[in-house]
Image (spheres, grey):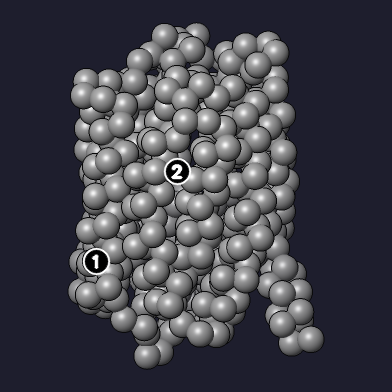
Amino acid sequence: MSDRAERRGILRGNIGVMILTSGLWNLAGSMTGPFFPLYVLELGGNYVDIGLISALRAVVGILPSFLGGYLADAVGRRKMLYSMSFLLSINQFLYAIAPHYTFLFIVVTLDALWEGIRSPSFGALIADSTKPRSRALAYAMWQITPSLFGLFSPYVIGILMDSYGILVALRWAYLAVFTTSFIASFLRYKLLKETLPTEDKKKTSPSTAVRETLSDFKVTFKSIPRQIWIILGLSYITNFAGSLCGSYFVTYAKNNIGLTMSEWGFISTLLTAVNIAVRLPAAWASDRYGRLKFILPSLFLVPVTYFLFVRCENFLQVTTVRTAMMILDSVQGPSREALFIDFSPREHRGRINAIASISMAPIGFTASIIGGALYQGVSTETPFHVSSALLLVGATYALLTFKEPKKREE
């Protein structure tokens, strides 16, 4: 009964609002995310362009994240979150009308700007709305429950792409994302509650924001616990590995293995269902039995799945390997996120989230460019092999350095 009461309590607050609104966003967003690299190709781009667009997204958000981190701790989480959500929603319409792949560079730049400003507030509001004893469970609930809204969306858009063509179907999908995300942004504006106490807010102005931002970030840097930097070290390794090949799973499946878009859409739908089935129990267990029991074994198994993916020859093999990837990610994901928050002081949480995002950007930028060059210039298998090796290095690093928190931050 106490567990059920805990879940109901989580759903009544900000986490519940974020579950609902993220679900609406995901309803149509799940139709575009798995297939964006194909959209670039359909608009005249090549594999290197896919890497460049991913790199641009990573690097443009650096400076906005500094400002966003300061504003999250200065003027509050809620205002920054809903205002940037509206701008990100409007951007989906620009994706829908893109006449050429070069236009995507403009849209992605705007995406990165708004997301860079929003990200620290987003992360801080979610973190503030959780309690230490149920933190991993709360994270898992708001992350996976929205997936139910878009459970069948990838399969549906896959069928439409097979019937009407990739370009036409994805334009329809982006229009749908614009509609559902605008509704979600409005609900965030109406329903979210501020989590930063009024007495902790700082009055600021555009003329002083930059100066105060740099000053406050210096204080935050000095306040970051050593274990946070250790956790970020693993994130740097895994982010680099993921950015090398993340954009090319769908193109490899389509061109090298011969999967149809409806088959890839079915796999995406299956992965969502697996994520839902695994993540909540894993989060519940993490809150009660510790984080590392779930993080470390998964980290050592993930590189094997990357290695096996490029050896798949048919739909069944791809389905099996991708399912294994998702199970491992769902087991370790809530624990890694909760561990990061466990060590993050509440009063610096917005800026710590910003520092994490900012420091990750150059890594994603570099890896995306290298991944595109390797995929097009060396071989389609090379990015996956390099990623597998890097992930094994990351697992070894975590085994030697990660520790359970003696006391979890509120």
State whether residue 347 appears in this view: no
> Residue 36 location, x and y as percent?
49, 27
Name the residue beneath numbered marker 1: 396
Q: Nearer the viewer, residue 95 or 71?
A: 95
226 shown above or below 378: below
Q: Amino acid at mark 2?
A: Glu
Q: Nearer the viewer, residue 391 or 73?
A: 391
What residue is at 35 percent from the left and 15 percent from the top?
A: 46
Q: Residues within 10 Å of mark 2 (few under 14, many from 20)?
A: many
> Residue 47 location, x and y as percent?
34, 20
Q: Secondary structure at mark 2?
A: helix
Q: Secondary structure at mark 1?
A: helix
27 shown above or below 67: above
> Residue 245 location, x and y as percent?
34, 37
Q: Quadrant of residue 391?
A: bottom left
202 shown above or below 385: below
User: Quick one: label 2 or label 1, which is nearer the N terminus?
Assistant: 2
